């Protein structure tokens, strides 16, 4: 174990490993005894060894009220260190594995251990720069799932689409691997190549993609003026720079005297809750943006901050199946207050709030679901999503022929709203 981990921390974290390993020992014993017939050809299992005693320093490192609960931890920790055939063991690896096992045992797919590499890559993505293929992904299912490719990214260039499931990477089957393991394999240095095997809904054959990784620099907000005095604002993530980029974009567009604003949240996989509130505050003058509902029944509310730049102009918002999390916070609030009509297809439906809590000694972070959020009208979005006011599909044929009926419908609605002013 690294020298930076002091002895008491090593002992406490070693406890977690013990539980995981003890569970594996008992599971293996049940399976062997129940399914394998007796035979002299079977591997030899030695006689049971006496129970491993908990050392005084281990007992002393455990809080008094937890000593009975943690006793099997220490026993299992001592068993593997004293009895396992290949020594020495990597205590750092055992510690990380124990934390992972504990987080997995919570039973929430959004709650998990982020090892140092995972934590670094996740935070770099929200800071606006990282190296990979350029796609927002879902790690809660059986396979790594594409939520949305980032505009201008290698993932978009080769034709990856929302809903694609990555079943193999560089020819290695991902069945049985965690989606997070798959995500780490997809990441890599700019200029290197990764080969993805993908299943896509309504496609019988697997799809193969060879993608050259790149340094992904994400401008989270861009804007331009469209015909009919409509300002188009594309928000593709809710990261560290989004609020400042939105201020700048709105200032530039508002200087051109637009009569309406079209906000594009399609394929925006989300980001920071605080950033979603900042962004919503630019379009809602006052009132609750969202409620945060905790497991103990308590509720926090997040209100618009006031002094928004565009609280009066007509709005239309574009959403699709790749619009998730913070995107749904913004779109849900605008829809509830009748500030905007939504155009597109049902949004993703991620309505839970996670905190990333860094662990000591640069050992990654615990990502924990702390609450579920509700729209101002107390709609639950988790697993449901937002239903647009106007459901407009975007087909493969539309994309191939550079058509965007969702955008066309949004512009049509804005023109009508502008005419009514």
Image: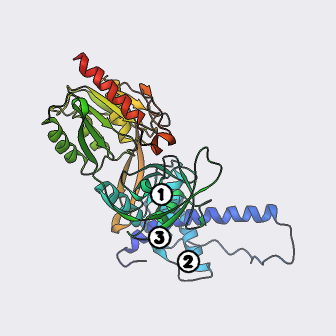
Estimate how packed mark 3 is, as few (under 14), some (14 to 19) or many (20 or more) residues with alpha carbons within 10 Å.
Answer: many
> Where's residue 305, x and y in %?
19, 34
Q: Position of 85 compared to 406: left or right?
A: right
- Residue 291 visible in the picture: no
Check disc 1 and report the residue beneath it: 66
> Where's residue 223, x and y in %?
24, 42
Residue closest to the eye, 351 or 341: 341
Check disc 3 and report the residue beneath it: 58
- Residue 69 visible in the picture: yes
- CA–CA distance between discs 3 and 2? 14 Å
Check disc 2 and report the residue beneath it: 81
- CA–CA distance between discs 2 and 1? 22 Å
Q: Earlier in the sequence, mark 1 or mark 3?
A: 3
> Where's residue 364, x and y in %?
38, 63
Position of 95 relative to 152 (above/below): below
Residue closest to the eye, 309 or 1: 309
Quadrant of the drawing holding the C terminus:
top left
Estimate how packed mark 1 is, as few (under 14), some (14 to 19) or many (20 or more) residues with alpha carbons within 10 Å.
Answer: few
């Amino acid at each position: 174990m690294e020298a930076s981990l002091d002895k008491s921390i090593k002992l406490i974290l070693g406890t977690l490993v013990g539980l995981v390993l003890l569970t594996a020992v008992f599971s293996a014993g049940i399976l062997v005894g129940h399914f394998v017939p007796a035979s002299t050809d079977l591997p030899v299992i030695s006689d049971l060894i006496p129970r491993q005693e908990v050392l005084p320093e281990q007992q002393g490192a455990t809080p008094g009220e937890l000593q009975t609960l943690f006793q099997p931890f220490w026993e299992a920790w001592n068993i593997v260190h004293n009895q396992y055939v290949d020594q020495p063991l990597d205590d750092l690896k055992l510690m990380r594995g124990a934390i992972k096992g504990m987080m997995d045992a919570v039973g929430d797919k959004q709650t998990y251990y982020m090892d140092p590499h995972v934590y670094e890559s996740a935070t770099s993505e929200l800071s606006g720069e990282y190296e990979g293929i350029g796609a927002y992904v879902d790690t809660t299912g059986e396979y790594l799932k594409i939520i949305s490719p980032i505009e201008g990214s290698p993932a978009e260039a080769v034709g990856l689409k929302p809903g694609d499931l990555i079943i193999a990477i560089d020819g290695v089957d991902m069945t049985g691997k965690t989606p997070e393991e798959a995500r780490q394999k997809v990441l890599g240095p700019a200029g290197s190549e990764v080969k993805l095997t993908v299943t896509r809904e309504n496609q019988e054959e697997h799809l193969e993609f060879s993608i050259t990784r790149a340094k992904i620099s994400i401008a989270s907000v861009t804007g331009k003026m469209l015909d009919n005095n409509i300002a188009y604002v594309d928000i593709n993530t809710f990261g560290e720079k989004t609020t400042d980029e939105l201020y700048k974009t709105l200032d530039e567009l508002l200087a051109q005297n637009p009569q309406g604003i079209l906000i594009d949240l399609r394929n925006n996989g989300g980001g920071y809750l605080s950033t979603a509130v900042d962004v919503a505050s630019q379009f809602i003058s006052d009132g609750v943006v969202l409620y945060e509902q905790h497991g103990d029944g308590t509720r926090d509310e997040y209100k618009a901050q006031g002094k928004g730049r565009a609280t009066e102009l007509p709005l239309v918002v574009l959403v699709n199946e790749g619009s998730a999390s913070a995107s749904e916070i913004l779109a849900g609030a605008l829809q509830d207050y009748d500030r905007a009509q939504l155009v597109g297809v049902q949004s993703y439906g991620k309505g839970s709030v996670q905190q990333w809590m860094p662990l000591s000694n640069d050992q990654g972070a615990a990502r924990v679901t702390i609450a579920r959020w509700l729209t101002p009208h107390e709609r639950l979005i988790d697993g449901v999503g937002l239903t647009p006011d106007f459901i407009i599909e975007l087909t493969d044929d539309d994309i191939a022929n550079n058509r965007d009926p969702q955008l066309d419908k949004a512009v049509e609605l804005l023109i009508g709203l502008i005419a009514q002013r």
